[in-house]
């Protein structure tokens, strides 16, 4: 009886240790995966935002840039020519 109890106690302990180790590993893996995912999401979001900002800024700037010098130059040039 005592031997059986000892064996079952050892089995229980090793099983608990194994379970806790697995839980710890899975938790760490989950955490690192979440961190990695969030970091990747953050980076990709920042890249997307910066490219969108850049694109929209370029879109906004380019017509304005093209229009304003032409508007400024053409009447002045015409006046000078006349």
Image (cartoon, grey):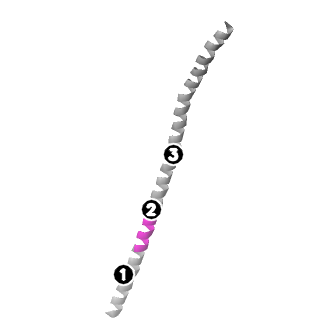
Query: Residue lying farthest bottom?
Result: 2
Q: Nearer the viewer, mark 3 or mark 2?
A: 3
Residue assigned mark 2: 31
Q: Which residue is mark 3?
A: 46
Q: Residue at x 43, y 70 (%)?
A: 24
Query: Disc 1 vs disc 3: which is toward the camera?
Result: 3
Who's the residue at 51% across and 45% down the image? 46
Magenta stretch containing residue 16, yes or no? no
Provide the major secondary structure of the magenta segment: helix
Residues 22 and 11: in front is 22
Q: Secondary structure at mark 2?
A: helix
Q: Nearer the viewer, mark 2 or mark 1?
A: 2
Q: Dot 3, how many residues are within 10 Å of its Cα: few (below 14), some (14-19), or many (20+)?
A: few
Callout 3 secondary element: helix
- Which mark, residue 12? 1
First along the sequence among labels 2 and 1: 1
User: Which residues make up the magenta segment?
Assistant: 20-29
What is the secondary structure assignment of the residue under circle 1? Answer: helix
């Amino acid at each position: 009886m005592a031997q059986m109890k000892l064996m079952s106690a050892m089995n229980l302990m090793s099983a608990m240790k194994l379970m806790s180790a697995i839980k710890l590993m899975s938790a760490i893996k989950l955490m690192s995966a979440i961190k990695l995912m969030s970091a990747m999401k953050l980076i990709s979001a920042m890249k997307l935002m910066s490219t969108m900002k850049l694109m929209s800024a370029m879109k906004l700037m380019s017509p304005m840039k093209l229009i304003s010098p032409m508007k400024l130059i053409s009447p002045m040039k015409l006046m000078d020519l006349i």
